[in-house]
Amino acid sequence: MVASSFLASFYFICGAVLFFVAITILRYSTRDIVGWATALVLLFSGTGPLIGAMGVILKSNLHEGAFLFRSLIDSFNYIWEFFFPSLVLFALVYPVEHKLWKHFRKFLIILFVPHFFHLILVIFLIDRINPADSFSFLQNISFLPDTLSSYLDKIAGILGVLTGMFFKAHTKLFSTVNISYAAFAMVLLGRSRRLELTPRVKRQASFVIVGLGVSVLTYSVARVIPIFWGGGAEAELSVAFINASLVIGGGTIAYVIVRYRFLGMKLIARKGIFIGGVTAILVSVYLIIVKQLTSYIRGFSDISIEVLEIGLIVIFIIIFQPLVVKIEEWVENISFGEGKSPRERIKTLSSELLSIVDADSMKRTINEVLSDIFEATRPDIILRDGICAIVREDNLETMERVFTGAREPIGKLDFIEAMGFERPKRRMFLPPSERDIAAVVNNLPAGIKWLAGFEMIVPVIRSGECSALLLLGEHEQRGHYSVEEIALFSMLASQIAAALSRIELLEEVVEKRVMEEELGIARRIQQDLLPSHAPYLERYEVAAVSIPSKQVGGDYFDYITRDGLFAFAVADVAGKGVPASLLMASLQASLRSMKGRIDDPVAVVSSLNEAMFDITSDDKFATLFYGCIDIKKNKLFYSNAGHFFPSIIRADGEIEELDYSGLVLGVKPDFEYESLKLKFKPGDTLVVTTDGILEAENEDGEFYGEKKLLGFLTELSGRSPDEIKNAIIKDVKGFSAHDRARDDMTILVLKRNR
């Protein structure tokens, strides 16, 4: 009796701890597949011992409860077996996601299909259906001939035998499915162990592999026992070994959580243990108070015992729910002091970081928390630029791989080993001495040596890159940090990453506004460079406009007058925006410097070509149409450097194109341009545009084009230059599918009135 009670207590304690740790992980790791897999392994490894404890209690106390006991044992035989597919799921995602995971993740249910099938057989078929009687209906068909009935009888017998054999084979051999699952999981874990992992994760994985290996071996022994053991005790011994295998398997992971900071879950595990302890207290209170109170009320009332218990349980839950919260706060206050719980302080820090607008303020705030709450010496944060300045380029790539692969705090010794340097040797069961550590650190490269001077290095990962390092010296009191504190450092790193993103976004917004202001100033300067109004010309009228697609553009027009001469130019510098605008300003300065030669188009264009070639790269060029009209003689002398052909609207409405063009400016310095001339008659109008007009697109991707422009110019015959300019701009904008021009647009219109 004593032995049974001890065994039941052992099963119950082990199962309860594993069960509550699993439930707590599920509660706090709902978005983490590794957390889910870990929780499932712990859940099913804890369910087995719990049901085993109930089975021991029932066997010892219910003399007439054989059926109930047998049902519970049956349940035990199929519920805990989900431990094995959960173990495969765990091996697929830990310590890193296996390449098979991308195929399994969409069809995860496949892992559990054999065990669901086993579940259905155990509940509804095995031990509940007699295969020999399952096909008896075939023997009871009276209206069939005797020969056919005889055949049906034989078929029914064969089917019954086959079904019985299937049930027995399934019962005896399903354990091989579990062992196969376990072997597959061990292979996956073993292969993952050979990957490039941090030293701490390698120790985690090694311990998990060894523990699960012992668990699988124990389970295999449990299944072999019934074969070689007789006398009726083999069932109990087999159950004991199965429980032992589950406790070893789940206990291994629980131990790694506590000892090796497995997946940063120690805080979660502590929460599970706390919940388990509180649950035990509440169960005891229930047994002592509620049961006694129910019996007392039952003596004075005819209310059924079930109704009384349900009502009292509801009241009990309502009363004790706030008490559980208070107990949890009380435990944390005892551990950390009133108001100094690191978790609460980090939550507060998260709100403070929302109002921080620069990295220096963020550093000061975080350093205060690290010094005050965690008692860290020399806390510091260095951003990526600082990391690159400290660490040599040949070590930087390795360090980047170490930190992005770990994604968690790394201790000094683990950092040294992960970087490929020799780790200080342990002395028997003692950690390496300070002298041994110093000897190794002193031989490291300068940047690595500086980082190894800190006790803890916490990478701050953003978008798959290490964007900062949180550095902590030794703990002021203990010298090292507890696993709870290290887990909180990971939480703090996530908050730092979010704060850096906000600061970077804010800096981008400020930088964008400053750039917009600067571009606005540049736009005003460029507009001042262009003629502000048309000059007064005897017998002639001129109008022009330039509309940049961005704040500033590369299109250009200009006027120059001298002694009865009126020269004008329309140019288009390749590109858009600031670079094009700078070249445009240079082109204008060069043109203005040649005022004494404006009556010689070839000299002007050739000089501009040489200037553009000297000041620009090979991929930069400009197109230019230059003309000079002798107002007294009404003759236009012009030259074209790769610009779109201008058009003449004659007084009678006929359209002519000035179809000469030389090479664009800036490509070949010694190119020989030609000068052409034409007679300007009263009513004639010259229209010069840039490619922004002809290449405007509509919704169908069609260009405005030269044909449409020439057709539209025919309709504008006889109008003033200003009216023609405005009409073209309006028509192009109506044609275009874009609210804003995709390229700079410039138009110059010159007309002889009489």
Image: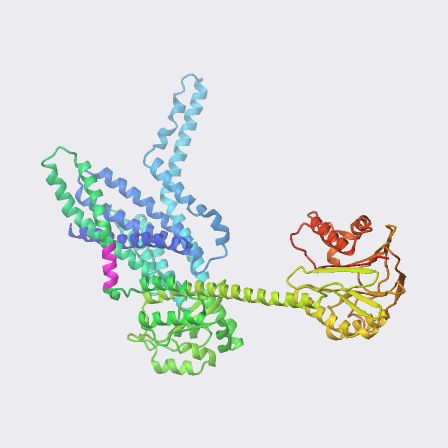
Relative placement, left or right, of 13 versus 107 is left
Which colour style is shown? rainbow
Report the residue at 58% width, 66% height from top: 517
Residue 233, image x, y percentages: 24, 48
Residue 703, image x, y percentages: 74, 51
Task: Decide whether residue 332 is among the magenta residues.
Answer: yes
Rendered image quadrant of residue 312: top left
Number of numbered discs overlaid on the protein picture:
0
Residue 310, image x, y percentages: 21, 39
Task: Decide whether residue 578 is among the magenta residues.
Answer: no
Query: Does residue 588 appear in the picture of this structure?
Result: yes
What residue occupies the far top of the structure in this picture? 143
Report the residue at 28% width, 49% height from top: 239
Relative placement, left or right, of 425 versus 8 is right
Q: Which residues are magenta?
A: 325-333
User: Is the residue 317 above or below the residue 667 in the image?
Assistant: above
Report the residue at 16% width, 36% height from top: 305
Rendered image quadrant of residue 277: bottom left
Q: Which one is nearer the viewer's eye here, 124 or 505?
A: 505
Q: Which one is nearer the viewer's eye here, 391 or 2?
A: 391
Q: Which one is nearer the viewer's eye here, 22 or 613?
A: 613
Residue 482, image x, y percentages: 31, 68
